[in-house]
Image (spheres, rainbow, N blue to C red):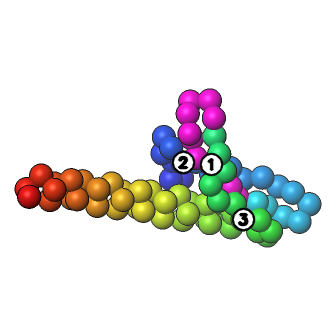
Amino acid sequence: MNKSKQYDIRIVQDDTGWMAEIIRRVTTKKTVVTKSQGEFTTESDAQAWGQGEVKALMQKRHLAKSNKRQLSQSERKQ
């Protein structure tokens, strides 16, 4: 499972099937649902979707940090 300090996956079963939620830790006590999708037929489908979304969010976050770092370095050179 792709687990980080900031993002996690919560799988919940409801009346229509399984629901996956991507949870983002804001502070040590507060969490927020970043993305959610429901009506999966199996728990493994929901888990697979959640893992893919966490991986995509982490890559996007890494890219944003990299771009910010490169921008600050180019500003220093000028």
Q: Secondary structure at mark 1?
A: strand
Q: Amino acid at mark 2?
A: Tyr
- Image coordinates of residue 71 in percent, x first then y, are 22, 59
- The residue pinned by badge 3 equals 37
- The residue pinned by badge 1 equals 23
**Quadrant location of residue 59?**
bottom left
- The residue pinned by badge 2 equals 7
Identify the mark nearer the N-term, 2 or 1. 2
- Image coordinates of residue 6 in percent, x first then y, are 50, 44
Point out the stretch of residues depicted in magenta: 20-30
- Image coordinates of residue 27 in percent, x first then y, are 55, 33
Q: Secondary structure at mark 3?
A: strand
Q: Is residue 70 visible?
A: yes
- Image coordinates of residue 3 in percent, x first then y, are 51, 48
For the residue pair 48 and 64, the one nearer the viewer reads as 64
How far separated are the C-alphas under marks 2 and 1? 6 Å
Question: As drawn, which residue projects farthest toward the left?
Answer: 77
Quadrant holding the C terminus? bottom left
Image position of 11 with respect to 29: above or below:
below
